[in-house]
Amino acid sequence: EAAVTQSPRNKVAVTGGKVTLSCNQTNNHNNMYWYRQDTGHGLRLIHYSYGAGSTEKGDIPDGYKASRPSQENFSLILELATPSQTSVYFCASGARTGSAETLYFGSGTRLTVL
Amino acid sequence: GDSVTQKQGQVTLSEDDFLFINCTYSTTTYPTLLWYVQYLGQGPQLLLKVTTANNKGISRGFEATYDKGTTSFHLQKASVQESDSAVYFCALALNYAQGLTFGLGTRVSVFP
């Protein structure tokens, strides 16, 4: 069954440290996305990608980098983590169905920055 | 800019109650309107999609309806079950392959 897998499920990091969140999809979808979920803010788009080698800025890209080395893998990188980046992060792959795209989400990574 | 507003933060119901969640949107384009559901410990998953052409979508006992005049769309279910307890998000799909714009989510708790 097609799937989006995120790792790690939970991560505790220190302020100023580097954090890499990984995402792997077996859907063979070109488009992939990183969102963060916070109470009071819903789901907000950080970065997205149209395919291997491409990354685009979403609505809240500051403090984050993204990397798409292959069709299957899409990483989110926090070079200098801050406590404000404590959140639940979701990766998704996207497939066009009719007039719009359906996103398939992973189970999330809970990141705590101390 | 484009936006979607989902004001109901939490809804508490008993089994067999009627569920109604409303969202309003603002955009200059013709959006596709979607409802996602997120169960505890999982990522969101697509529940329903409504286009401006068909006005209505039905899935798993849920019905989504769109009203162009009031730029609103809502989700309803006639008789909820405890298994429907989840967070429900409305979302806009504006431009293909640029992600979705989500509402804040409504936490629905159904008690037996």
Image (tube, coloured by chain):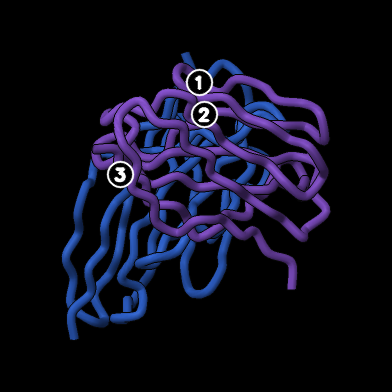
Q: Which quadrant would residue B78 be assigned to in this image?
A: bottom left
- Which chain corresponds to the colour blue? B
Measured from the top left, where is residue B73 in percent x and y? 44, 43
Mark 2 nearby-residue class (10 Å; few <14, some 14–19, many ≥20): many
C-alpha distance separating marks 2 and 3: 17 Å
Q: Which quadrant would residue A24 be assigned to in this image?
A: bottom right
Pick the quarter of the image with the C terminus of chain A. Answer: top left
- Which chain corresponds to the colour purple? A
- Mark 2 belongs to which subunit? A
Measured from the top left, where is residue A79 in percent x and y? 48, 25
Q: Which residue is mark 2?
A: A46
Q: Which residue is mark 3?
A: A112
C-alpha distance separating marks 3 and 1: 18 Å
Measured from the top left, where is residue A33 in percent x and y? 62, 38
| Residue pictured at 30% horizontal, 44% vertical | A112
* Circle nearer the N terminus (2, 3): 2
With respect to residue A61, does A36 lie above or below?
Answer: below
* Circle nearer the N terminus (3, 1): 1
- Mark 3 belongs to which subunit? A
Q: Which quadrant would residue A9 be assigned to in this image?
A: bottom left
For mark 3, give the secondary structure.
Answer: strand
Q: What residue type is disc 2 on?
A: Ile
* Circle nearer the N terminus (1, 2): 2
Pick the quarter of the image with the N terminus of chain A. Answer: bottom right
Measured from the top left, where is residue B7 in percent x and y? 25, 39
Callout 2 and callout 3 share a chain = yes
| Residue pictured at 59% horizontal, 47% vertical | A22
